[in-house]
Image (tube, helix red, strand yellow):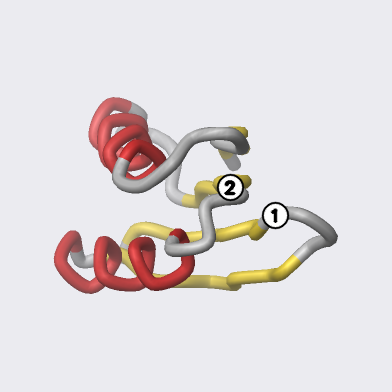
Amino acid sequence: MSVNDFRGLKCPIPVLKAFRIIKEEKEINNFTFLTDDKSAPKDFKDFCKNANLSIIEIKKCKSYHKISIKRN
């Protein structure tokens, strides 16, 4: 599993960085992204739909979202 902290970054940077990481890390199937961007849950849902990925969980923590996705 890969955990990436994107807190402090605003749309669309978290999704763009996530795309790059998923593309480069071909041996990893599960990814977790931490982000405090308010639009991130919707952005990541759209990203996963378009990139043939699956949302495992979107969890609201105190001041950020923990978004877990996997390759299909």
3D distance between C-alphas at marks 2 and 1? 5 Å
Instruction: Check disc 1 and give the amino acid type.
Output: Tyr
The x and y percentages for residue 55 are: 45, 71
Which disc, if any, is residue 64?
1
The x and y percentages for residue 53 are: 30, 64
Check disc 2 and report its element: helix, strand or loop: strand
Q: Which residue is drawn at 72% across and 69% down?
A: 60
| Left or right of residue 71, residue 70 in this image | right
Whichever of callouts 2 and 1 sits on the residue coming sooner in the sequence is 2
Give neighbour class at mark 2: few <14, some 14-19, many 20+ (Cα, 10 Å): many
Q: Which residue is drawn at 28% across and 26% down?
A: 24
Give neighbour class at mark 1: few <14, some 14-19, many 20+ (Cα, 10 Å): some
- Residue at label 2? 35
The x and y percentages for residue 51 are: 18, 60
Q: Are marks 2 and 1 in contact (CB under 8 Å)?
A: yes
Q: In which quarter of the image is the N terminus?
A: top right
In the image, is residue 18 above or below residue 21?
below
Front residue of 43/10: it is 10
The x and y percentages for residue 45 are: 35, 72
| Left or right of residue 47, residue 14 in this image | right
In the image, is residue 8 above or below residue 31?
above
Query: Quick one: which residue is furthest to the top in this view?
Result: 24
| Left or right of residue 41, residue 33 in this image | right
| Left or right of residue 2, residue 48 in this image | left
Q: In which quarter of the image is the C terminus?
A: bottom left
Question: Which picture quadrant has residue 5?
Answer: top right
Which disc, if any, is residue 25?
none
